[in-house]
Image (cartoon, rainbow, N blue to C red):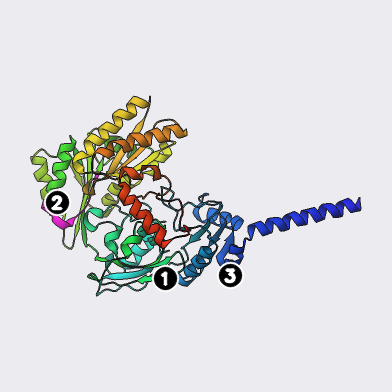
């Protein structure tokens, strides 16, 4: 009996030792040796830690989680992983919706969250240097203290990080005036797959000395290297805002309204958001927490805002009175105080109400000419009606820059429904200038649709760049293409 117990204990110990050896692969041991155990977490600790930080399981089943505290840590990590041909996935706030930052059990996740320093704002040259793990909202608060704004504004600003914003070339609510992330980056520091540190932290606006390499990494979704630091362009904070919620009878009038607003306000026009009635009704129903700011029986709505250094309410009033008299709009409400402005924007941004109301919800982020938007939505709705007994299509977006969001529920949870809805949404885009991803990137979720927006020649050049900079294919493999 004693012999059996000893044998059992020996087998258990041997089994545990084998498991330990499987977990502590040479690449993991090398990383621990170089960085220390505090910066290299096992698969189990990574799962526990991320679940505690983010509140739910996302990208948890990884080989290990590395938490670099400096650019040098990132360089050491990538050099070791490249030597072992170990795949890595850069991660930030995990707010991406196309699985750009999703890692599997054979990959090592590298979170930039500890690299969250913000240097002092350069008030004369109007820029700030930040590390990749800085949360967007924290950057907003920091530069506000110096009288500036960083104009990228996203619904996920409380969790998304600057490195991810750059890697996905984020857009947002003010792209009409300030452009997308690409327009706001002056310089970058990037670590390449072999550990080489590419320092391009040069804030000058004009630098016509060969290839502007930073643009290779902006929008690359971590497939070419890891962004560690950036110099970002700032703008003096507007002293005044004027915000209006507008109702219209048809889409032609919304196009005319946009055109007139651009001419009348010039560069003061920061946002021009369009909302279809289903979206407005759901986001202002009794369970939404939002109040109706205007009747919910109109065919279309626009939320628009201007910003500047001087009081603007009179300008907005004059504009609204003119377009009302010209029968371009049928009703409008002007925000009288900051609380009204906040209420208006909550209706546009509180899209979690759609996710609460429906399951599943298939989300889309497309761009197309403003002149094509109405027919596009009509076509999508008609095709959904042909294929599903019941469906809900919540259409809204940044009309000012041609970016439309669709959130669709068709009452079916199977994969076939998802693939069919994707085909219904993307197919009409092939015949017009467009993109299957205006803001969110490609990641894993949109890989099969990349050819709808990029030619074979473009994709071939992308692959060539990837192969040159990452010959061992360790950087976020399988993403984009």
Q: Nearer the viewer, mark 3 or mark 1?
A: 1
- In-front residue for pair 381/11: 11
Q: Establish if 194 lies above or below 457.
A: below
Eye-nearest disc, 1 or 2: 1
Looking at the rendered structure, the secondary structure element under dot 3 is: loop
Residue occupying image coordinates x 50% and y 52%: 103
Q: In the visual, does 9 lie left or right of 249?
A: right
- Depth check, mark 2 against mark 3: the one in front is 3
Quadrant housing residue 187? bottom left
Q: Position of residue 177 (x, y in %)?
A: 21, 56
Q: Position of residue 427 (x, y in %)?
A: 31, 36
Tag 3 residue? 36
Q: Are marks 1 and 2 in contact (CB under 8 Å)?
A: no
The residue that label 1 is drawn on is: 197
Closer to the chain start, of discs 1 and 2, is 1
What's the distance in space between the residues labelled 2 and 3, CA to CA? 55 Å
């Amino acid at each position: 009996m004693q012999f059996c117990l000893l044998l059992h204990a020996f087998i258990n110990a041997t089994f545990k030792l084998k498991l330990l050896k499987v977990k502590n692969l040479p690449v993991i041991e090398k990383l621990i040796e170089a960085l220390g155990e505090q910066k290299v977490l096992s698969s189990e600790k990574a799962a526990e830690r991320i679940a505690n930080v983010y509140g739910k399981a996302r990208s948890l089943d990884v080989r290990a989680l590395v938490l670099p505290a400096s650019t040098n840590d990132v360089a050491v990590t990538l050099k070791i992983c490249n030597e072992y041909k170990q795949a890595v996935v850069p991660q930030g706030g995990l707010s991406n919706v196309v699985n750009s930052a999703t890692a599997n059990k054979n990959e090592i996740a590298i979170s930039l969250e500890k690299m969250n320093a913000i240097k002092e704002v350069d008030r004369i040259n109007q820029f700030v240097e930040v590390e990749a793990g800085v949360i967007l909202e924290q950057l907003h608060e920091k530069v506000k203290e110096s009288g500036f704004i960083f104009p990228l504004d996203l619904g996920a600003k409380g969790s998304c990080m600057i490195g991810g914003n750059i890697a996905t070339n984020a857009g947002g609510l003010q792209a009409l005036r300030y452009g997308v992330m690409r327009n706001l980056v002056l310089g970058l520091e990037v670590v390449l797959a072999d550990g080489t540190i590419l320092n391009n932290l040069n804030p000058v606006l004009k630098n016509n000395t060969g290839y502007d390499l930073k643009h290779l990494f902006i929008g690359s979704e971590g497939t070419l290297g890891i962004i560690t630091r950036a110099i970002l362009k700032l703008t003096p904070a507007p002293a005044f805002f004027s915000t209006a919620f507008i109702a219209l009878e048809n889409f032609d009038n919304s196009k005319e309204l946009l055109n007139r607003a651009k001419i009348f306000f010039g560069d003061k026009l920061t946002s021009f958001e369009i909302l279809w009635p289903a979206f407005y009704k759901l986001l202002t129903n009794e369970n939404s927490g939002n109040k109706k700011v205007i009747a919910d029986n109109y065919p279309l709505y626009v939320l628009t805002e201007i910003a500047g250094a001087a009081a603007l309410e009179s300008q907005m009033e004059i504009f609204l009175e003119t377009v009302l008299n010209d029968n371009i709009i049928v009703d409008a409400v002007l925000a009288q105080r900051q609380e009204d402005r906040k209420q208006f924007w909550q209706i546009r941004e509180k899209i979690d109400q759609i996710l609460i109301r429906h399951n599943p919800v298939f989300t889309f982020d497309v761009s197309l000419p403003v002149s094509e938007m109405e027919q596009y939505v009509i076509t999508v709705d008609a095709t959904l009606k042909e294929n599903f007994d019941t469906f809900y299509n919540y259409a809204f977006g940044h009309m000012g820059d041609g970016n439309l969001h669709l959130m669709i529920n068709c009452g079916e949870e199977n994969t076939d429904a998802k693939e069919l809805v994707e085909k219904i949404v993307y197919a009409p885009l092939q015949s017009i200038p467009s993109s299957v991803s205006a803001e969110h990137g490609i990641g894993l979720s949109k890989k099969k649709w990349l050819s709808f927006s990029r030619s074979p020649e473009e994709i071939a050049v992308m692959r060539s760049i990837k192969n040159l900079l990452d010959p061992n294919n360790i950087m976020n493999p399988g993403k984009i293409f």
